[in-house]
Amino acid sequence: MFENVALKLRRRISLRRRLALHKLLLFLLVTSLAGSGEDKIPRFRASTELVQVSVVALDQEGRVATSLTKRDFEVFEDGVKQDIVECMSEASPLSVALVLDKSRSMKTNLPLVIQGAFSMVDTHINSDDEFLLVAFDKTPRLLLPQFTGDAETVKHVISSDVAEAKGVTSLFDALYLAVSNVKQKAKNVQRAVVVITDGGDTDSRYTKKEILEYIQEADVPVFAVNASEPNIFRTWIVGKNGKPELLTEDDAIGPAERGGPKVLKELTSATGGAVFTAHEPGDIPRIMSAVYDLIGHQYTISYKPSRTTGAFRIGSSHKINLKLTAGDNRFEGYHLTYKHQYYRPSDHERETNTLAASPRL
């Protein structure tokens, strides 16, 4: 009998405990639902946001400007001056995707394209530098699927796969392929895409508008060597009189190629990069070495956008303007290259990109 009483007591205590637990769970559920209409902690807190701008500074001679500090810069967001938190500059290891145009319009320039690529690879002195290779004509191809720091391997692949110019031009598709791979695979913070082309696009699946939107948000600067100057395309033949004659008509040079410089300026400006024009064929190798030096010596300027002005708006794009400031005009003639616009997402906004979500290549 005593055993039955004890068993009943244990069951009653167990039942009370379960009821108490259920009440506690119900209370927690009700209170959580009641607070669901209140403000939650946002995933993106603009009050703690730090905007970072990479900038290349060139002096009056076109050389990389060194030893600048945050006191030498002024930064404006939407016309409102901002307080610079930090300005850093150091020679860092690079991750660079080389994009080489081997389409028909580059036929006379292809040896210079190869020479220019070799020049950039030979310029690197940091053992942690790495390269990726993309070549394109009708379609872009990833010649090196992974980054490598082996300069001889890079040069061998270039020599083997960029030997013949033919086909139409898919510049926009090639840029998407290069930028997306840099985003996914580059191990270094300092990264860039460098393309040698005449700037003409005749057969890409992506439109200029689509690729502009993509690379603008990708945070990978694009630098271009413009090989579309008229004198670059000069083709010499030996005439009937035995003397060299200039062949002025070249079927490979069409309206798309002639509009190349403007297209390249749009593409590079959207990323904080720049266009360098080869006025003579021999300029290409020299430009490639200089561009590599620029990429490795960027300043990174950090500032916290002010909430007290109309410049602070979430969920919209914002314009950036950088200046060098000095009362003695010692920066006269200097040139700054940087990304002039960025997008500040709103609270709880998920950043998506239709190109990245459904690549066409």
Image (cartoon, rainbow, N blue to C red):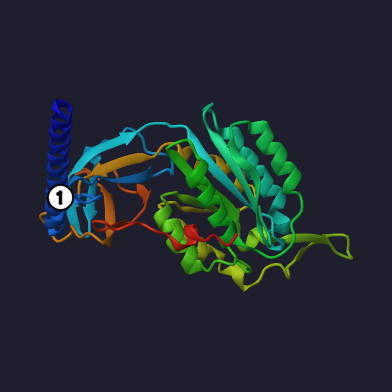
Q: Nearer the viewer, residue 330 or 216?
A: 216
Q: Nearer the viewer, residue 212 or 77?
A: 212
- Image quarter hosting the N terminus: top left
The image quadrant that residue 133 belongs to is: top right
Circle 1 sits in a helix, a strand or a loop, which is it? Answer: helix
User: In the shown orientation, is residue 139 left or right of residue 309?
Assistant: right
Q: Nearer the viewer, residue 39 or 326?
A: 39
- Image quarter hosting the C terminus: bottom right
User: In the shown orientation, is residue 77 left or right of residue 242?
Assistant: left
User: Where 48 falls versus 340 (above or below)?
Assistant: above
- Residue 330 appears in the picture as rendered: no
User: In the shown orientation, is residue 195 left or right of residue 40?
Assistant: right
Task: Residue 158: give x, y in percent of width and height.
Answer: 70, 43
Q: Nearer the viewer, residue 70 or 304?
A: 304
The image quadrant that residue 253 belongs to is: bottom right
Write the residue at 59% across / 56% down.
174
Task: Residue 311: give x, y in percent of width and height.
Answer: 18, 59
- Residue 63 appears in the picture as rendered: yes
Q: How many marks?
A: 1
User: In the shown orientation, is residue 233 left or right of residue 244?
Assistant: left
Crowd tier of the residue under label 1, counting other residues whose Cα lies within 10 Å: few below 14, some 14–19, many 20 or above: few
Task: Residue 88: give x, y in percent of width and height.
Answer: 31, 35
In this view, the residue farthest toward the bottom is 255
User: Where 263 falls versus 307 (above or below)?
Assistant: below
Task: Residue 250: give x, y in percent of width and height.
Answer: 73, 68
Write the residue at 73% across / 42% down.
159
List the residue tagged with mark 1: 26
Q: Amino acid at mark 1?
A: Leu
User: Where 108 falls versus 15 (above or below)?
Assistant: below
In this view, the residue farthest toward the front is 1
